[in-house]
Image (cartoon, rainbow, N blue to C red):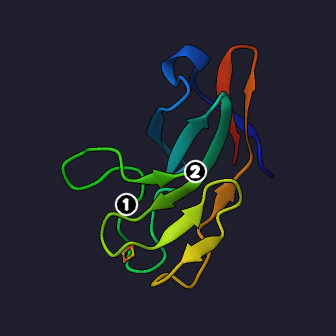
Amino acid sequence: MADWVTLCANQELPPGQREVFGINGRWIAVFNIDGAVYAIEDLCTHDGNVLAFDQYDQPSKLIGCEVECPRHGARFDIRNGKVTRRPAEVDVPWFEARIKDGNVQVLI
Ligand code: FES
């Protein structure tokens, strides 16, 4: 059964920021877009690259609510995990996320 897990205090993930958290053996990328938080698995379904940051630990490209894999350019909608651009063909796992009592939480 899934449970809400607290990741950090809300002020540690301000709008425009992202962070990756290790939870239950998975890496979860959490994005704050204009005060709303979204969470996807930080693992591109094309060839297993990370999504939230590039190889130099710089934030990967975010176009609206689509994150672009820094390796081959696949894009995923962080609001639902759907593929929006190839070469990936499989959606990335998505997790419900929220801000509650001043904390960022995901349902996992
Ligand atoms: S590993 Fe992400 S697009 Fe290829």
Where is residue 36 drawn, in percent x and y?
69, 34
Q: Is residue 25 visible?
A: no
Query: In the shown orientation, is residue 46 left or right of residue 98?
Result: left
Q: Is residue 29 left or right of residue 33?
A: left
Determine whether the beta carbon of the residue marked 2 sits less than 8 angstroms from the nearest atom of ligand 1.
no
Instruction: Pinpoint residue 9: horizontal percent, then vertical percent.
Output: 58, 17
- Image location (x, y in percent) of residue 13: 52, 25
Residue highlighted by disc 2? 64
Name the outermost residue toward the right.
1
> Which amino acid lies under the numbered mark 1 shown in the image of this protein?
Val
User: Which residue is found at the position 55% from the left and 42% from the top?
Assistant: 30
The crowding category of the residue bearing disc 2, from other C-alpha atoms within 10 Å (few below 14, some 14 to 19, many at least 20), is: few
What label sits on residue 50 in the rendered view? 1
**Would you say 59 lies left or right of 19 here?**
left
Asked whether residue 63 is in view, the answer is yes
Amino acid at pointer 2: Gly
Instruction: Count neighbours of disc 1 (C-alpha within 10 A) and say few if under 14, some if 14 to 19, many if 20 or more.
Output: many
Secondary structure state at the residue bearing disc 1: loop
Q: Nearer the viewer, residue 97 or 75?
A: 75
Which quarter of the figure has residue 35?
top right
- Name the quadrant where ligand 1 sits: bottom left
Residue 2 placement, left or right of 45? right
Q: CA distance from mark 1 to mark 2?
A: 19 Å
Residue depicted at x 59% and y 81%: 90
Q: Residue at x 44, y 62 (%)?
A: 68
